Image: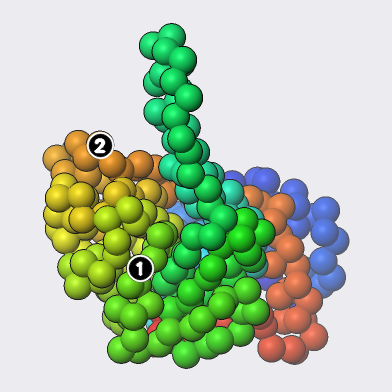
């Protein structure tokens, strides 16, 4: 009978969901406390938890075979000093809708000039300004995994042309043209919107740099819902200050929380959020765990396995 350790700040909620799922042949330990996990869960074969909490207990889990991470990003588990003698799977297929709401909510806010119109309302000024539209624009997606593919589908709904930049894959039918490797600047040239959904890997670090920002037109908007490490933040600040690009929507940063002295706080053409564009919804995460657990007990290959070397 597999023994499962749930390690999460929402451990009680996940316990209830697992019990309601009536998964077969399962013994359960659920806690938000790593000390309790070390006391009661060291013999667990499976960990279902938050990557930020798992490293503290990882060395003690003598029977560990599989870790199901509750996040898409698993950076805390990729530290080379940590063991890698188990199967690691992450959360995929559950964030696309939330990310689409976030990204296109801000793009619509920009095109429809929502903030300016609201300011006119506050000042009691009748000001019928001309607004833009998403239709006919071009969006570039840095990364076309499950989230990027969902964004591409939403973009097509609005009549947007979609470019995708990936390491190799070309599996999303909603991407009109794919770019790889040295074609990064060709990919970015002339984009109306550039959206990064990239993970934190050696290849993606500071991929959004001065040379890339330079080929964007002055009206372009940059959105980052992937990882802050993908951006050369100094180059982005310069591009925003000089109006080289029109603005940015930033949910992730190199250092989080964003330091109080960060220049981003004072830029009038930036929207800042707090790594909240697509938080994990326990009921959604359970669908991933349930499917993978059934695969585990049947001895089948698990979905969403992470390559420790690639980082995703």
| Of 91 and 66, the residue lying toward us | 91
Q: Indicate the quadrant where residue 294 lies.
A: bottom right
Q: Earlier in the sequence, mark 2 or mark 1?
A: 1
Residue 214 rendering spot, x and y as whole percentages: 21, 67
Residue 28 rendering spot, x and y as whole percentages: 70, 61
Q: Indicate the quadrant where residue 304 lies.
A: bottom right
> On screen, 205 above or below 270?
below
- Nearer the observer, disc 2 or disc 1? 1
- Residue lying at the far top in this picture: please name it: 124
Q: Where is mark 1, residue-wise?
A: 190
Q: Are there few (<14), some (14-19), or many (20+) residues within 10 Å of tag 2?
A: few
Q: Residue at coordinates 32% horizontally, 53% vertically from top-left?
A: 219
Instruction: Report the side of 155 relative to 178 (left or right).
Output: right
Q: Residue at coordinates 44% horizontally, 42% vertically from top-left?
A: 110
Instruction: Report the side of 208 relative to 75 (left or right).
Output: left
Q: Where is mark 2, residue-wise?
A: 268
The Cα–Cα distance between marks 2 and 1, rounded to whole angstroms, is: 23 Å
Residue 34, disc: none
| Of 177 and 273, the residue lying toward us | 177
| Of 38 and 300, the residue lying toward us | 300
């Amino acid at each position: 009978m597999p023994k499962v350790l749930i390690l999460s700040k929402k451990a009680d909620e996940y316990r209830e969901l697992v019990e309601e799922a009536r998964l077969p042949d399962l013994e359960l330990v659920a806690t938000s406390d790593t000390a309790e996990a070390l006391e009661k869960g060291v013999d667990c074969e499976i960990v279902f938890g938050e990557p930020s909490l798992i490293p503290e207990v990882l060395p003690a889990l003598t029977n560990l075979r599989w870790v199901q991470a509750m996040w898409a990003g698993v950076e805390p588990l990729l530290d080379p000093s940590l063991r890698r003698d188990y199967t690691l799977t992450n959360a995929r297929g559950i964030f696309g809708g939330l990310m689409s709401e976030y990204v296109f909510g801000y793009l619509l806010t920009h095109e429809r000039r929502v903030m300016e119109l609201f300011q006119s309302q506050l000042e009691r000024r009748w000001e019928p300004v001309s607004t833009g539209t998403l239709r006919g624009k071009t969006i570039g997606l840095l990364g076309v995994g499950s989230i990027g593919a969902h964004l591409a589908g939403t973009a097509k709904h609005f009549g947007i042309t979609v470019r995708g930049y990936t390491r190799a894959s070309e599996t999303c039918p909603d991407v009109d043209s794919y770019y790889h490797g040295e074609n990064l600047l060709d990919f970015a040239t002339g984009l109306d919107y550039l959206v990064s959904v990239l993970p934190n890997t050696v290849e993606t670090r500071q991929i959004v740099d001065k040379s890339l920002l330079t080929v964007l037109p002055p009206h372009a908007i940059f959105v980052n819902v992937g990882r802050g490490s993908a951006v050369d933040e100094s180059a982005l600040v310069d591009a925003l200050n000089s109006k080289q690009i029109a603005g940015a929507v930033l949910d992730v940063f190199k250092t989080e929380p964003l330091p109080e002295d960060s220049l981003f706080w004072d830029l009038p053409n930036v929207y800042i959020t707090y790594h909240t564009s697509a938080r994990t919804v326990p009921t959604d995460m359970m669908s991933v765990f349930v499917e993978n657990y059934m695969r585990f007990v049947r001895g089948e290959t698990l979905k969403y396995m992470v390559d420790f070397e690639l980082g995703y």
